[in-house]
Image (cartoon, helix red, strand yellow):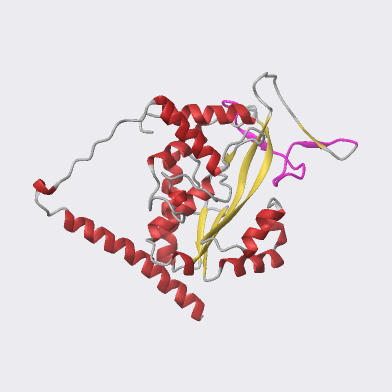
Amino acid sequence: MRQALKLMAMGAALLGSAASASQENSKGDDRDESDDILVTGARQTREESRKAAVDFLRKTGAATTFKQVARWVEPVCPRAFGLSSEHATLVEAKVRAIAADAGAPVAPAECKANIAITFTMDGGRFVRTLSRRAPRQFTRVSPARMRELREGEEPVRWWYGDAIQAKGTSGSGDTPAPWTGGEGGGSGSALPLVDGAPSLNQYGSSLISTGAVRALVQATVVIDVSRVEGLPLDTVASYAAMVSLAEINALDDPPAQSILGLFGSGPNVQAVTQEDATFLSALYALPLDRLPRRQRGALIRAMTEDPGG
């Protein structure tokens, strides 16, 4: 009970920080127009934009040349835990808004949660307890990452569940059918071979399509309230949205112009940036049934060509 009350108080404090900032901004609107400062800067060249896109993908680990990119195929349904209902609703609404802006599918309000965002006073302890009580939650987590989740000191911890899915045949061909070959979850169209290895049903032929995609089916975000104290709730929710909508690796060296650098030593970015938004939009426009190197190249091109990038 005491911990629940403290979490509610922390939530109120986080919300209060946002309200205070809003009030300060509104006060600033009353200043004389002569006080306005115009800042101009040179637009990035195409080559500079390309280097920035490559750096973003490298530092987040969101697209490599050896592993297919994963994103949400089923509509996302975020749920926040450990806060008052009012504050939880604000967090969920922020995640939904960022997902919608990116072009990700978003479930209606009454839905089964597949993104869990938990606010707790001790993130490491929460993970250790959960791993004992529900070990299947961590089926897709590597041993090294598991140690970080259990023993690390990150203010925000996260992990995913993914599934390999067969490419469907309706619409544009990107509609997937779940695969139960042991790599993820769901049910569907896998036929076991004699040696126990699964195979995918594949319809049609293509020299470009892989016939299979990786899809996110679960994301868990654990926020250590004692380590994010003083940050606006909107900022924390935006960070949670970023790491739950894309498969982001642990961030030893986060991109500078990204909310992913919130807890780094770089610029104090407290909102989803243009670079973040460009990446998410490119991710959710990306054909999933492609080889990893083609996906990475497509993301770099999209992030380079975006007019707002």
Q: Residue shown at 32%/61% (left/top)?
A: 18
Q: Quadrant of residue 48?
A: top left
Inspect this view and state whether residue 109 appears. no
**Residue 297, percent across and down?**
55, 27
Residue 231 versus residue 105: which sits nearer the camera? 231
Q: Residue shown at 70%/46% (left/top)?
A: 184
Q: Residue shown at 53%/43% (left/top)?
A: 59
Dominant secondary-structure state across the stretch colored magenta:
loop
Q: Residue shown at 22%/40% (left/top)?
A: 39
Range drawn in magenta: 171-194
Residue 87 versus residue 141: which sits nearer the camera? 141
The verdict on residue 175 being magenta is: yes
Please say if 307 is above or below 120.
above
Q: Quadrant of residue 72?
A: top right
**Residue 309, percent across and down?**
38, 33
The verdict on residue 72 being magenta is: no
Please say if 290 is above or below 110.
above
Q: Quadrant of residue 287?
A: top right
Task: Give the side of residue 168 with respect to residue 115, left or right.
Answer: right
Task: Give the side of residue 249 with respect to residue 260, left or right.
Answer: right
**Residue 135, percent across and down?**
72, 61
Please say if 114 is above or below 303.
below
**Residue 61, percent across and down?**
58, 42
Inspect this view and state whether residue 301 appears. yes
Q: Hey, which residue is sitting farthest bottom in the picture?
A: 2
